[in-house]
Image (cartoon, grey):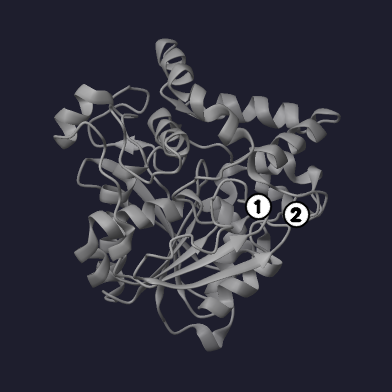
Amino acid sequence: MRHYVKELLTQNLPKIHPNPQEPEQNVFWQLEGRKFIAKRYGYPLQSHEVVTEDGYILTLHRISGSRNPENSKKKQPVLVFHGLGGSSAFWMLQGKKSLAFFLGDSGYDVWLGNWRGNYYSNRHVTLAEDSAKYWNFGFHEMAIYDLPACIDFVANRTGEKGNLIYVGHSMGTTISYIYSTVKRKHAEDNVKAIISLAPVAYMKNVMGAFRLLAPLAPLVADILRSKGFNAIGQYYKVQRTILVATCGNYPFIDLCNILLIFSSGLSVEQFQAEMIPVFFSYYPSGISLRTLEHFAQIVTSNGRFRMFDYGLRGNLEHYNSTDPPEYDTSQIPVPIHLFVGNNDIIGDVKSPTYMRHTKGLVARSVVNDIYGVL
């Protein structure tokens, strides 16, 4: 598995190179085209609903077969989760070279997850999607509710309990560390390995937009909430229309490209400007303000990886402590493999001591000097 992921990262992950004029890329402009993309390349795609303990309705997409007849027999299930503002569609945006299809051809049973709040997981049993109560969550809740629910669903559907490999990107790695810390026994019983692509946890040496904007996060969040906004990407179709119209035309396409480079560490070689409209057809998708605030708190606390800070009174109510507890990653029971891009300005992974104290850490691989967090 490490060989497959490393090979993918050094060639494909997710640097979107295709010529947007090629016919096969036209389907990427339609969000609902994910099934067509899979079908076009000969992969069966299933959709499954998962209801979390707190009532959020999530969507899992499953690639249950391979184009290669020799790999048609079911093998290990792999659960792949996107990063901040992403979705399962991100793993199919490169057509036949995409991670989802790559793993399918390698003989894995591929499950693509969607965190609560994104385009494919935007429903709740009782709460309205546009309500403040619906959006009152962060990545901590995704870790203790979404991930265990999806893992249990895959285990029950495949009968492969304890044999699942988890692949997370960016925030997807953050969530896996919290899950395997807070839900340690569940992780030990159900997850065979964690593959971390562009890992994010301590964020002590973050650069770029995250570093500059983190101190302003509480003020910006309060202003947005006062105007009725509870998330970035909450009104997805309107936002998508504006972003694609703006970033799909010169000279604004170059400006959007520069903003992506500044915010994520992308290089010119990694991301072609012509693919910017395709990217913004899918991004950002449903980022709760609580999620952004929590990341900002980690940055402004000198990289302390800890639970959400509710303030003095709120912390006493939630934690019976004036400070939020830190996530103890030292006892994570699952083997972890880190894949790092040297140009990543969000994940604080350049130091060789990063997560060195984690019991489950198996390997740390620097895959390419040009890769950022995307």
Quick check: marks 1 and 2 in contact, CB under 8 Å? yes
User: Going by the picture, which residue comes out furthest to the right?
Assistant: 251
- Amino acid on which the number 2 mark rests in the picture: Gln
Q: Let me know if residue 337 appears in the view.
A: yes
Count of numbered badges drawn on the protein: 2
Per the image, the residue denoted by label 1 is 372
Q: Earlier in the sequence, mark 1 or mark 2?
A: 2
Q: Residues within 10 Å of mark 2 (few under 14, many from 20)?
A: some
User: Going by the picture, which residue comes out furthest to the bottom?
Assistant: 70
Query: In whole angstroms, how far apart are the C-alphas of marks 1 and 2?
Result: 9 Å
Q: Which mark is residue 108?
A: none
Q: In this rendering, would 39 be left or right of 162?
A: right
At horizontal 38% and vertical 65% (from top left) the residue drawn is 357
User: Which x, y percent locates residue 39?
Assistant: 58, 63
User: Which x, y percent locates residue 230?
Assistant: 41, 23
- Amino acid on which the number 1 mark rests in the picture: Gly
Q: In this rendering, would 180 be left or right of 314?
A: right
User: Which x, y percent locates residue 71?
Assistant: 51, 84
Q: Which mark is residue 270?
A: 2
